[in-house]
Image (cartoon, rainbow, N blue to C red):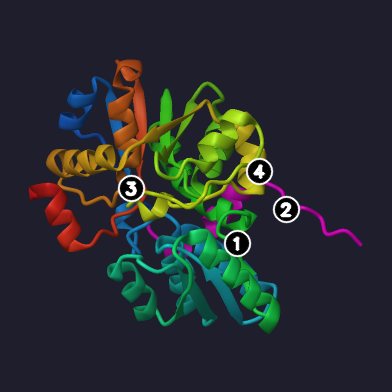
Amino acid sequence: MKTAQPQVPRLIDVFAARTVVNRYLKPTPLIHPRGLSKLLGCEAFLKLENLQPTRAFKVRGGVRFMENMVKQGQPRIVITASTGNHAQSIAYAGKLFGVQVKVVMPQGVPQLKSEAVKDLGAELLFHGNHYDEAREYAERLAGQNGYLYIHPSNEPLLFEGVATMHLEVFEEQPDLDIVITPIGGGSGASAACIVYKSLDPKIKVIGVQAEGAPAFYNSWKSGSIMSTDGVKTQAEGLATSQAYELPFSFLKEKLDDVILVSDAEMMQAVRTIFSTTGQVAELSGAASTAAATKIKNELQGKNVALLVTGGNIEPHQLAKILFG
């Protein structure tokens, strides 16, 4: 019998997920920094997911997934692959619900992220030089050992949990014109489209990818899933070498645009966010602000939400960006 393909959640599923997520995580602030708004020439609103317990938005999806898994009585050993923030999400939720977690990471992820995963009690394995090599290895281990594999980009329950951040944005600032969100695997951008295109289709959703990891951008432009020969970006949260079926099948019709930003532009955005708000963003967490800076002529006078999706950056890297 052919296995049914997973479906992108509906808005009603996101509301259901919020009843779970809100039991374990507090809503994060949506701020309206005057300095950043003046710099961009628009009314800029920053959603501070860097203030989550794991300092990244993905923890919402981990909590939603793990609560459902335990409720369904599924296996108590799970495995996943990640460059850091998804790993912390699953490790955090595993600790919360008493589930054993194994995480495969590629070589070279920031020590800050790998140590955080271990501190949360997950078993950490290193394999490959970029995310997709680690992912393929995790999938093999799951098949060989009977672990429950959690795909970071093709798992609908993760979308539901992540989308709760966009519900918070919309309920606090419903008269938005544009939302700009990073795209690594695509769960965050998919979550954005589920919420905004359901509640107010006039709101434009713009995705951002790193120039050195443009697999989704290339796929979106061509209309079919594409991959790249490795990745060349320091923004590990965006360092994917291919687009993924579930988010791509949804986003190819829903996204209004996709923009590429360089590592240098993301570093400048880290500086901009810090100088205008005092908040710390990792490179991928600053990608939305980098994109807004790049297209600011298109944003003039508009209400624009920018997702600060993560703040897991090594102190020495932050110091180098700010002062080096």
Which segment did they paint magenta? Answer: 1-26
From the viewer's perspective, tell me whether residue 54 is left or right of residue 122: left
Q: Does residue 241 sit above or below 65 in this rendering? A: above
From the viewer's perspective, tell me whether residue 240 is left or right of residue 139: left
Residue 247: % across, % down: 61, 45
Residue 223: % across, % down: 65, 31
- The Cα–Cα distance between marks 2 and 3, rounded to whole angstroms, is 28 Å
53 part of magenta stretch: no
Q: Do the residues labelled 2 and 4 touch (CB within 8 Å)?
A: no
Q: How many labels does the image show?
A: 4
Q: Does residue 138 sit above or below 154 in this rendering? A: below
Q: What's the residue type where badge 2 is placed?
A: Pro
State the residue position of label 1: 151
State the residue position of label 2: 6
Q: What's the residue type where badge 3 is placed?
A: Gly
State the residue position of label 3: 285
- The Cα–Cα distance between marks 3 and 1, rounded to whole angstroms, is 21 Å
- On residue 10, which mark appears? 4
